[in-house]
């Protein structure tokens, strides 16, 4: 596809109408990315498409633009014209926002159906008959079964985004139920980072004579990504994390851990050391996860601590660095994690902190990506100058977690951590002062 890449220089060349070309321009999409160049013309021809593409490759545009084009072409477009199923709440909301941004000039209405948000609020949105439904499988099925007047019986397009992740999250039975409630005569787009046996099975069930496109070599990472590792004793991992984040001060960073508790503990340690860090994990309620994500996006903090639950559910276009604080036991998760940086042609850095217990997992990662990674350069003596300060910050953080754990039990919620975050960013003081002003 090299020649096509060189010849095709604009979205207009792909066969898209002027309204959508202008919408792309407003979003800063100056030229189509590889997955868009390959998928959009096929989709416009009415074909079912399977797209294998890395995170950050532009696949949302690859399916959203053909659907919006079809909506424009339809003389009397149905409500519930298309349905996009996504593995995470955050990703579903972000896809919905992109549909609305791309379709703003043509009056597209979109509804996000995700867990953690009131069903009645979503019922009201469905009552307005949106053209596009984006949601997680569980919540979409809930509405299909329980919401009066909501049916996908006239659906024209189905998108299964991040299909490998959808199936890993045990949505298989839910997907089968949804497939039984939508028309067989439809167009289907399936996008996945990897082609697993489960994805192949799903493809056979729900796509008709699909065209398969591959926008990247299997399990590869992009050329603009600088990947490094540091082998270190487990007891010094916190020091190396602080050292790297300090060396890269001002950069936006995502730090991946294995557990939810680790995201909280590390966020507290880093905040005790004056760094602007915030956690996001699967134990947080939906509003709190979105609140943390918005603080990161807005620049209130520049370090996001997250688990793999978040690794493929966040749409953050400008992350400078990914740090694997814990090495993933599943090598494919490494691809998804580091896909958060070096996106859309930008450069980025990924650094993996490997202790003595994680070496085998790291070797498997190098085998998967087909390259030996260089070591991150740091003098141990220089790094360990931080040991005393980091140790004290960790002691204070552990005490704080025990205290907030007690508060949670007494209050029956997770407001303790929120109070810590609000206090750190000065939000509580601002709220108090605004209350005082109001009282005056």
Image (spheres, helix red, strand yellow):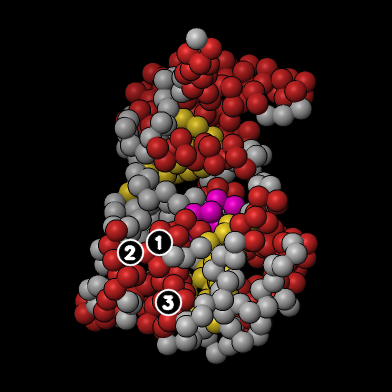
**Residue toward you, 212 or 364:** 212
Q: Does residue 384 appear anywhere in the picture?
A: yes
Up the image or down, 198 lies above or below 122; here it is below
**Image quadrant in which you'd find residue 170:** bottom right
Pointer 3 local density, CA inside 10 Å: few below 14, some 14–19, many at least 20: some
Which label is found at residue 405?
A: none
Q: Secondary structure at mark 2?
A: helix
Q: Main secondary structure of the magenta part?
A: helix
Q: State the image coordinates of residue 317 (x, y, percent, origin top left).
A: 37, 50
Left or right: 365, with 247 as reference point: right
Q: Secondary structure at mark 3?
A: helix
Q: Residue at x 75, y 68 (%)?
A: 173
Stretch in magenta: 89-95
Asked if the residues shown at circle 1 and circle 2 are in contact, with their CB atoms under 8 angstroms apart, the answer is yes
Q: State the image coordinates of residue 190 (x, y, percent, origin top left).
A: 54, 74
Specify which label sits upstream in the sequence, 1 or 2: 2
Mark 3–mark 2 Cα distance, whole angstroms, equals 14 Å
The question of residue 91 being in magenta is answered with: yes
Asked if the residues shown at circle 3 and circle 2 are in contact, with their CB atoms under 8 angstroms apart, the answer is no
Nearer the observer: mark 3 or 2; the answer is 3
Which label is found at residue 72?
A: 3
- Number of labels in the image equals 3
**Residue toward you, 44 or 279:** 44
Left or right: 7, with 198 as reference point: left
Left or right: 75, with 170 as reference point: left
């Amino acid at each position: 596809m090299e020649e096509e890449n060189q010849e095709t220089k604009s979205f207009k060349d792909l066969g898209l109408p002027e309204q959508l070309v202008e919408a792309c321009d407003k979003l800063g999409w100056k030229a189509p990315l590889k997955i868009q160049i390959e998928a959009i013309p096929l989709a416009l021809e009415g074909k079912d498409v399977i797209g294998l593409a890395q995170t950050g490759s532009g696949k949302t545009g690859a399916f959203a633009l053909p659907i919006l084009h079809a909506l424009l072409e339809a003389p009397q477009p149905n409500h519930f014209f298309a349905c996009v199923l996504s593995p995470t709440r955050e990703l579903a909301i972000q896809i919905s926002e992109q549909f609305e941004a791309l379709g703003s000039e043509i009056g597209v209405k979109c509804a996000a159906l995700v867990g953690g948000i009131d069903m009645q609020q979503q019922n009201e949105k469905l009552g307005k008959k949106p053209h596009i439904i984006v949601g997680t499988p569980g919540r979409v099925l809930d509405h299909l079964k329980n919401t009066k007047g909501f049916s996908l019986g006239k659906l024209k397009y189905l998108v299964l985004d991040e299909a490998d992740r959808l199936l890993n999250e045990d949505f298989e039975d839910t997907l089968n139920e949804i497939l039984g409630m939508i028309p067989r005569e439809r167009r289907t787009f399936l996008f996945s980072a990897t082609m697993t046996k489960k994805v192949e099975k799903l493809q056979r069930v729900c796509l008709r004579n699909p065209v398969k496109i591959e926008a990247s070599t299997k399990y590869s990472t992009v050329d603009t990504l600088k990947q490094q590792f540091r082998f270190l004793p487990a007891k010094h991992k916190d020091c190396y994390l602080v050292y790297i984040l300090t060396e890269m001060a001002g950069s936006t960073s995502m730090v991946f851990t294995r557990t939810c508790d680790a995201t909280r503990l590390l966020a507290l340690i880093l905040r005790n050391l004056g760094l602007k860090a915030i956690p996001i994990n699967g134990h947080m309620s939906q509003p709190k996860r979105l609140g943390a994500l918005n603080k990161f996006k807005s620049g209130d903090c520049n370090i996001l601590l997250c688990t793999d639950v978040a690794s493929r559910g966040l749409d953050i276009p400008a992350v400078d660095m990914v740090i694997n604080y814990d090495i993933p036991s599943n090598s494919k998760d490494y691809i998804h994690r580091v896909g958060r940086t070096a996106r859309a042609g930008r450069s980025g850095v990924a650094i993996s902190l490997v202790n003595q217990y994680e070496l085998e997992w790291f070797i498997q990662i190098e085998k998967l990506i087909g390259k030996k990674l260089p070591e991150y350069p740091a003098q141990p003596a220089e790094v360990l100058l931080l040991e005393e300060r980091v140790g004290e910050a960790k002691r204070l953080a552990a005490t704080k977690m025990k205290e907030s754990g007690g508060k949670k039990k007494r209050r029956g919620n997770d407001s303790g951590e929120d109070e810590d975050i609000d206090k750190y960013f000065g939000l509580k003081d601002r709220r108090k002062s605004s209350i005082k002003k109001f009282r005056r």
